[in-house]
Image (tube, rainbow, N blue to C red):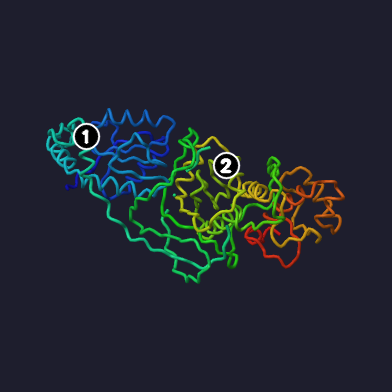
Amino acid sequence: MTNTPTRISLYGFPKRDRNAIEVLLRHDSGGVVIVDDPEHADVQVIDLDGPAHEEVWEQARREFDGPRVVISVRERAYADPDEMIRKPYHSSRLLEAIHRLAERFPEIDDRLVAASREAQPGEKRAVEVPETEPDEAAVPGAETDRKRDTVELESIPVATVRETISPQPEGPFSAIRSRSLAPGEDDGIPTLTIREEPPTGFVEETPVEPQREESPEADNYSTGLAEVHFLDVHPGETDELSTPDSTVQVEVPPIALATDPVEESDYDPEKTLQGIVARAWEMAGERNMPLEICELGEPLILCPRRRIVLTTLTDEHLESLSQMPLNVEDVEVSWVDPFMVDSIVSQSTDRPVSFNEFCWKVALMCSRGRLPEGVSPSEPVELRMEDDEHPAYPGGAEMIALWKAEAVSLTDTSVKLGYPAEEVFTFFSAMRALGLAEVPGRHRKGLFSRLFHKLA
């Protein structure tokens, strides 16, 4: 290889993402530059998550016959790239993929050398790249053979960390490398594995296809990945975290109670989506970095700096997830590049959801007329609110006024106000999840209550 820069052409990238890549390349010592004319490019980089991704792919194939890097949330059946980068991804992976292609296809460097010899000294015009000699890779129909010669990526050692824990159980939005976690002991309690990749490694992972048909909404999702973890649900001691404002007026529609009789009278929030979100937010707050909860069928990114949640999960999908127990061992999370999150938020026309609003919605869906384990409906309710503002809920204002006026239990609240006990239980469970109400007792304090202890 020579010191001549490798030239790339970009397809399907929004303007802001293209500008971000240009900034990245200016600080890259590997020698990669962007060219507007695909005839002068050596490597093609394609983003296939736009609204017309199939048209973008066909245009890229017509205008360029060389090595390609494809960036996408999922593998596309019609695409046949030389390098596939799944989103979210860290920016360094793009550079590594380009450098690998430059090494695997030496004709790139040969063309660059020939082109540089033809250029006149001091001339600032774009260098014309002569056509390559016919070879197996350039013969129509021989692309499959070229792919067959592609070398396999070397596997990167992955450090596995298991920490002792206590078991506990979706607008388009879009990950910076972080320090390694110290290994912990495994005492046999069910845990989630945290996997840290080396800072400069590239690991191809088996994609987890969503259990649904592709939708235009999902195609607009664009992100970047730094590393992959399995969520370690560990209550432990509560760290001092940056938490959402304690009082925000949130318009959340009432959650329909289950039509079938509820067999159990209470539930364990930590074994539902509610507990998974709480633990993930705690982890994100510890590093003050965005974190994505994977394996849900759609992206779900928690952003502690902005105190928002980015997701393409519909309310129907979210409610379905909230009504089932989650296997904590199968929950996977990944760190997200804050710069990529800022880029997505600035491009999106959808309003980001505040963390308080999202937690309130999830808690309502998880409760469905039930109380958290250990909460007695016959004990008086204690409010832990600093003012009168609270998330909107039918009858919520009346219940709060009653709890302020006298020491009354949840059962008596239902009788005095004439509300179904299930509605009272659901409202209290959501208030408790945000740390705004509690029933004193010996019950175990939930993750949400620990996270929001400063709000009391």
Position in image of residue 298 (x %, y %): 50, 43
Left or right of 451? Residue 369 is right
Of residue 249 and residue 428, the one placed in the foreground of this image is: 428
Q: Is residue 423 above or below residue 183?
A: above
Tag in front: 2 or 1:
2
Of residue 433 and residue 92, the one placed in the foreground of this image is: 433
Tell me which amino acid carries mark 2.
His
Position in image of residue 363 (x %, y %): 66, 50
Is label 2 in contact with label 1 (beta carbons under 8 Å)? no
Residue at x 62%, y 52% (from the top left corner): 244
Residue at the spot of label 2? 317
| Residue 435, picture quadrant | bottom right
Tell me which amino acid carries mark 1.
Lys
Q: Determine whether the residue tagged by mark 1 lies in a helix, strand or loop.
A: loop
Residue at x 41%, y 49% (from the top left corner): 225
Of residue 330 and residue 44, the one placed in the foreground of this image is: 330
Position in image of residue 438 (x %, y %): 74, 59
Left or right of 200? Residue 416 is right
Q: Determine whether the residue tagged by mark 2 lies in a helix, strand or loop.
A: helix
Circle 1 packing at 10 Å, graded few (<14), some (14-19), many (20+), is: few
How far is mark 2 from mark 1, CA to CA? 55 Å
**Label number found at residue 124:** 1
Give the quadrant of the C terminus: bottom right
Circle 2 packing at 10 Å, graded few (<14), some (14-19), many (20+), is: some
